Image (cartoon, grey):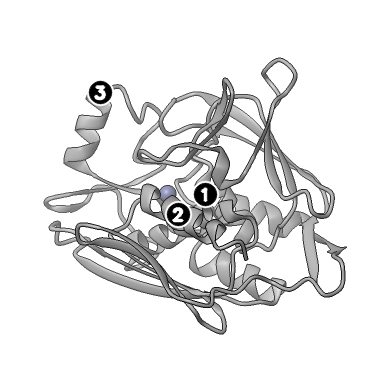
Amino acid sequence: MQQHTIAASITQTGVGLHSGVSTQVRILPAEVGSGRYFVRVDLLNSPIIPAQVAAVSQTVLSTQLGKGEASIRTVEHLLAALVGMGVDNARIEIDGPELPLLDGSARVWAESIAEVGWRSQRVNDGELSPVIKEPIWIYEGDTFVAAIPAPETRFTYGIDFDLSAIGNQWHSWSLPADVEKASASFASEIAPARTFGLLHQIEHLQKTGLIKGGSLENALVCGPDGWLNPPLRFANEPVRHKILDLVGDLSLVGNIPSAHFLAYKASHNLHIQLAQRILDLGL
Ligand SMILES: [Zn+2]
C-alpha cells in the first residue's frame, strides 16, 4: 500500500466565511503516517490540531476543529480537496481562525495540488485499506447518513428544498482507487461545486453577526425567484457541494474506508456522527 503527500508547498490567502478574517494558508509535504494536520502559526508555541474526529469542536454551518484555546473553522473544503486529490499526509499552516472560503468550492485547492503534484510514500507491506463490513447509519427526523458495504468507495447524496430552483436533487460519485484517476475525477466532478445558501436564511445569519465574509462571489444564493448569481457550474451544483462537504467531514476518520456512503438532507453534525461510528468500529 502507498500513501501520498504533496511534492511542494502551496500558499493561498483569503477571507473566512464566518469570521470575515483574512488568513494565509501554507500546505507543506508531511512524513508518511503523519496524516493531515493544522498548525496555528499565529499562536504562541504554534499548536497542532490534527484533522481527526476527536478534534471536532463545533458543527454548526461548518466544521470546526479545536485543541485547547486554538481552533480552526470551515476545514471541510480543503480537507475534501486533499482526500479527493489523494493527499494522505499534509502539514497545513494557518495564521488565523478560519480557512479562506475562496470561491466557495474546492476548485482552487484541487488545482493547486494538481499543479505541485504528488510524492509517493511507502507504507508497511500488508497494511490494507479499511472496509465497512456491515451497514451502519445515523438518522434524525427525515435526514440520514449511512455507510453500506461496497466493493468501491462511492458517495450518493440527496437534497430536497421548497425553492423550485433547487428542488429535489440526487448525485452519485465514486472515488477511484487509483490516485491519478481519483484526482482527475474529483477535480472535474466535485471540486468546482460551490457553497450555496437560501436568501431568507442569509439575511437572518447576517443580522446575527454570522457569515461576515459571505458574498455573491463566494456562495450561490437562491431566492424565491431563482438564483441571484447564475450561471451554475453544474445543473445540480448544490447536491454536488453536499458530496464535497461529506468527503471533507469523513476525511476526519483518517483513511476513509471502502463503502457506499449515502446521505439525505444531512448536515455536518450527522456527517461527523457517522465518522465517529466508523472510528468506533476500530477497523
Ligand atoms: Zn461546504
Mark 1 and mark 2 lie on one chain; the one further toward the N terminus is 1
Q: Residue at x 49, y 79 (%)?
A: 149
How far apart are the alpha carbons under marks 1 and 3? 24 Å
**Which amino acid does the dot numbered 2 rest on?**
Asp
Whole-percent x, y for residue 105 in the image: 48, 51
Residue with the mark numbered 2: 245
**Which amino acid does the dot numbered 1 rest on?**
His
Residue 141, numbered circle: none
- Farthest top residue in view: 44
Residue with the mark numbered 3: 208
Q: Is mark 1 within 8 Å of ligand 1?
A: yes
Q: Residue at x 24, y 47 (%)?
A: 228
Whole-percent x, y for residue 7 in the image: 83, 54
**Above or below for 88 versus 150:** above
Q: Is mark 2 within 8 Å of ligand 1?
A: yes
Q: Are marks 1 and 2 in contact (CB under 8 Å)?
A: yes
Residue 77, numbered circle: 1
With 132 as the anchor, is 219 left or right in this view? left
Which quadrant: the C terminus? bottom right
